[in-house]
Image: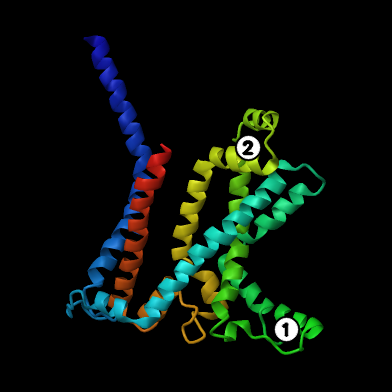
Amino acid sequence: MVSLTAKRQENARKVALVAALLAPATVLFVLFVVVPVVQAGYYSFFKWNGIGSLDNFIGLKNFGKIFKDKIFHIALINNIKVVVASLVIQLPLAFFLALLLGRSRFRGEAILRSIFFFPYILAEIVSGIIWKFIYNPQFGLPTILSRLFLDGHEIGLMGDPHRAFNAILVVIIWKYLGFHMVLYIAGLQGVPSELEDAAVVDGANKFQIIWNVIIPSMKSTFIISIFMSIIGAFNIFDVVWALGQGGPVHTSETLVTYLYNFGFKRFAFGYGSAVAVTLFLICFVFNIFYQKFVVSEEK
């Protein structure tokens, strides 16, 4: 009886310790995540300029306005383009670099890793400003290359509605390539060398080893990388804003720049909150489906 009581007291102390350790993080999460989400959901039902009282209830009209707006459609398509570029170009390229730098041993390997990872540690706004100078139509890199090898015309990428967002995609791929590369290098270290040795003994070539041994062994790493890439693609803001603030003529808008341009800059906080709720729901629904159909299968 005494031992049972002592065991219960020990369990109670463990629960109290866990609760005490989790309490600060829980409070911060509630204050800075849960409360703002609930507030945004509440504000989205009002036509509100952020200053006066919340007395103009309009129900779901803000959401109806969102889905009728052609610029919102452009922003959503642009975010989907970021997702596709990440999955088709950025992640395969990062995996290729990880294979080169993670398995090869040569002088300067650590320097190359640092060079590829360096853009990720730069602040996004700083990266955007740097590339704004690179894309400058008067002295930027495209204009210099044009003067050296082509007709010598100035190339204004960020002023061309048909090319501006493609130029932004290049910056996004450059910015986050190193992060996924390092993630894949870490995943490569968890691949058992015995499996590769066995594949070599069986006569497999390098491509077969990569496809049949390395990639299946890194499935959990790919799941994390793809998830972070897609969620990050829908929340991209600083780089796009620094390069063109969604222009020219809103052709490079993303969902977050659209929220800022058409919500907060115009003091339409009710409408901006509706856009924020829409973005939250997109990410939330994706997260549910990803957890259910991808992560659960891995377990």
Residue found 69% across the figure and 28% down from its top: 201
Q: CA distance from mark 2 to mark 1?
A: 43 Å
Q: Residues within 10 Å of mark 1 (few under 14, many from 20)?
A: many
What is the number of callouts on the image?
2
Residue found 24% across the figure and 14% down from its top: 4
Residue found 57% across the figure and 86% down from its top: 160
In the rendered structure, the answer to whether residue 6 lies left or right of residue 259 reads left
Residue found 64% across the figure and 86% down from its top: 156
Q: Amino acid at mark 2?
A: Gln
Q: What is the secondary structure assignment of the residue under circle 1?
A: helix
**Coordinates of residue 261 in the picture (x, y in percent):** 41, 80
- Mark 2 or mark 1: whose residue is earlier in sequence: 1
Q: Quadrant of the N terminus?
A: top left
Residue 299 image-quadrant placement: top left
Asked whether 261 or 205 is in front, the reply is 205
Q: Amino acid at mark 1?
A: Thr
Q: What is the secondary structure assignment of the residue under circle 2?
A: loop
The residue where tag 2 is placed is 189
Asked whether 153 or 216 is in front, the reply is 216
**Coordinates of residue 184 in the picture (x, y in percent):** 60, 46
The residue where tag 1 is placed is 143
